[in-house]
Amino acid sequence: MDIECQVTDIEIFPHRLLGCETTEKLLTDLNEIDAVNRIVIHGRRVPVEDGEEPRFITIKGERIDLHVKTGRVLIEIRTAEVEDPDVFCNEIRGICTQHLPFGFNMTEGTFIRKQKTVSDGLKYGENIDNIPDRLVGLTDQNVLVGERTTSIKK
């Protein structure tokens, strides 16, 4: 099955870095859209001092430690489930307008890798064939996958 023909990405670039509460509300509402396959957040790493509680958000009842100040939100969309692309984009834009009153840019394109790469091979070694598709594109060579990646079933 050719996954590239079935998905596209939308990048939401807020005009400010997002705190935990705003990130949680935005992700919760975006996750309610049926055609959303996965959501990835990017941002500046936030160090946690000794004895300090890590920042966290709760999505679908699951606590997720937040290691970044959210600066970009990448949404992978299953295009076969989108009947009218304009209505769909307006739905996402409406959610963003509600939670990001300070402004944002929204761009459609390819932002999340769709195929396993050499970096994935270096990270996972012989286990590369066992990587679930939902983890492709989330490789960080400096940390273990479990430290920075949380997968929540839809």
Image (cartoon, rainbow, N blue to C red):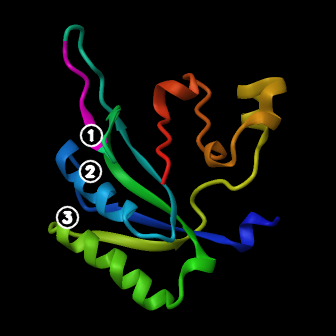
Q: Residue at position x 50%, y 48% from top?
A: 153
Q: Residue at position x 34%, y 80% from top?
A: 91
Tell me whether the residue at label 1 lies in contact with that at label 2, contact meaning CB atoms closer than 8 angstroms: yes
Dot placed on the residue nearer the N-terminal end, 1 or 2 = 2
Q: Residue at position x 42%, y 46% from top?
A: 42
Q: CA distance from mark 3 to mark 1?
A: 15 Å
Q: Is residue 2 left or right of residue 136?
A: right
- Residues 45 and 26: in front is 26
Q: Give residue 49's position: percent from left, percent from top.
A: 23, 14
Q: CA distance from mark 1 to mark 2?
A: 8 Å
Q: Quadrant of residue 57?
A: top left
Amino acid carrying label 2: it is Thr
Q: Which residue is mark 3?
A: 99
Q: Is residue 43 something one can see in this rendering?
A: yes
Mark toward the viewer: 1 or 2: 1
Q: Which residue is mark 2?
A: 23
Numbered disc 1: secondary structure: strand
Q: For the magenta stretch, what is the residue range?
A: 52-58
**Label 3 neighbour load within 10 Å: few <14, some 14-19, many 20+:** some
> Mark number for residue 11?
none
Q: Give residue 109's position: percent from left, percent from top.
A: 57, 71
Q: Which residue is mark 1?
A: 57
Q: Residue at position x 50%, y 87% from top?
A: 85
Dot placed on the residue nearer the N-terminal end, 2 or 3 = 2
- For the N terminus, the quadrant is bottom right
- Residues 15 and 81: in front is 81
Amino acid carrying label 1: it is Ile
Tell me whether the residue at label 3 lies in contact with that at label 1, contact meaning CB atoms closer than 8 angstroms: no
